[in-house]
Amino acid sequence: MEINKVYKFDEKLAQSKGVCKDNDMQIIKAMLHGCVKVTEASLEMDKKGADYIAKLRGNAEVYIDAKTRTKGCSKFWKNEPELAIERWSVLPEKGKNGKTGWTLDENKITDLVLYTFDKSDSNNAYLVSFQTLRIASARNINAWYKKYKVDTQSSGEWKSQAVFVPVSIVFESMQAAQSTSVRINNDS
């Protein structure tokens, strides 16, 4: 298995909490209708899937997980930005169980996911429903793995793995996930 990147978790966390924080907070406030305040979540909340907490006018809180792509990612794109869909946070290896990636993790408290990019790659930002993204990803992950770029990263201690899917394909899949219907048998 080829490893495309080696990174340190602490460095990635510092980047997201430092360089990206002010920009992310401004984007969230601009994109989330009714948002009056955005605060950084605690490290404990971060581990559960919330980098930011947005407060709405009616005092409801919205938990947002921020995903920023590394500078230069656009060199891999065909015609549009790609979104990272993480299948494995810890890749299963050598008889050890893996850990489900954040995109598929049913334990996350995330309400929305904010995808951003370095300005040299794209000025677009996407704020999407986590549960709809999770369902769409679960339904399509195997097909996406066969069709799109898969990247394995190493922290030195463990490996993670994601597939990079064009935003239009992700959005089409999310639309299909939102419009699923089930026939209920009312015969008792």
Image (tube, rainbow, N blue to C red):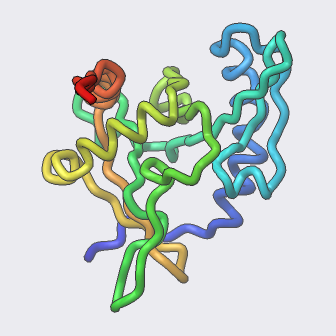
Q: Quadrant of residue 53?
A: top right
Quadrant that contains the N terminus: bottom left
- Please say whether residue 150 is visible from this viewpoint: yes
Q: Quadrant of residue 19?
A: top right
Residue sitting at x 78%, y 46%: 18
- Describe residue 16's horizontal placement relative to residue 37 as left or right: left
Residue sitting at x 69%, y 47%: 16
- Describe residue 143's horizontal placement relative to residue 111 as left or right: left
x and y percent of residue 7 in the render? Answer: 55, 67
Residue sitting at x 83%, y 10%: 57
Relative depth, front residue between 74 and 151: 151
- Describe residue 130's horizontal placement relative to residue 164 as left or right: right
Residue 88 to residue 46: above or below: below
x and y percent of residue 139 in the render? Answer: 26, 42
x and y percent of residue 24 in the render? Answer: 69, 30
Q: Most extreme residue toward the bottom, as rendered?
A: 94
Residue 96 to residue 103: above or below: below
